[in-house]
Amino acid sequence: MTRSIGRRFHKIRLTLGNLVYVVLLMGHAYGETRPVIRYEGSRLLGVERGQALLRVRLEVTNPGKQAIPVEYGRVDLRLGHQPIGHGTLPPTSFPAHRQRAVEVPVELSLRRLGGLLPDLLLRPALPWSAQGYVQLAGPRIPIDEQGEVRSTQVTPLLEQLFREE
């Protein structure tokens, strides 16, 4: 399949192998320099005084020609319909033409996690969501990811949290 993209790019063949490259070319042709932020996962670091520390990993892709400074960022985590914690991204910079993993420390409330035990026992799976934003010097980039986690994956985590507490 062949398509013409603007005046500068004629008949670029769109194949699965070069599709990402073409998307980046289109972004540069039309001045798109906003980074793309994707939730990648999280891991438990430890438990102390009723709070569990979790690291949320975000993958950031900056298609622009310059590094982008970040003023502030925030991530809120929910399990089921219960907010379970939030974290902030300190000032940093996203390098030009690169992908970079950024980790945001999130404090989880053990009391709120404990309130989820009845749901975990009665339901085979719970929805989760990670929402927030990254504030650049100009625009604000939203973070909005969601999915479903099996109760059997969460129950051992809760047991570990309460055992360490």
Image (tube, grey):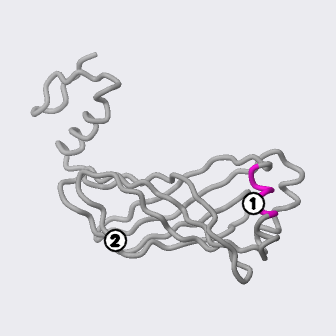
Disc 2 residue crowd, few under 14, some 14–19, many 20+, Cα 10 Å: some
Between 65 and 157, the one lying in front of the other is: 157
Residue placed under numbered mark 1 in the picture: 157
Quadrant of residue 30 within the rendered picture = top left
Q: Quadrant of the N terminus?
A: top left
Range covered by the magenta-colored residues: 153-159
Chief secondary structure of the magenta span?
A: helix
Q: Amino acid at mark 2?
A: Thr
Distance of label 2 from label 1 (alpha carbons): 31 Å
How far from the left and from the top, in percent, is residue 139? 33, 65
In the rendered structure, the answer to whether residue 56 lies left or right of residue 49 reads left
Quadrant of residue 165 within the rendered picture = bottom right
How far from the left and from the top, in percent, is residue 112? 76, 71
Q: Residue at x 60, y 50 (%)?
A: 146
Q: Amino acid at mark 1?
A: Leu
In the rendered structure, the answer to whether residue 77 lies left or right of residue 118 reads left
State the SS at label 2.
Answer: strand
Residue 99 inside the magenta-drawn segment: no
Q: Residue at x 54, y 72 (%)?
A: 87
Q: Residue at x 78, y 63 (%)?
A: 158
Residue placed under numbered mark 2 in the picture: 92
Between 71 and 155, the one lying in front of the other is: 155
Disc 1 residue crowd, few under 14, some 14–19, many 20+, Cα 10 Å: few
Between 49 and 113, the one lying in front of the other is: 49
Q: Work out whether 53 lies above or below 65.
A: below
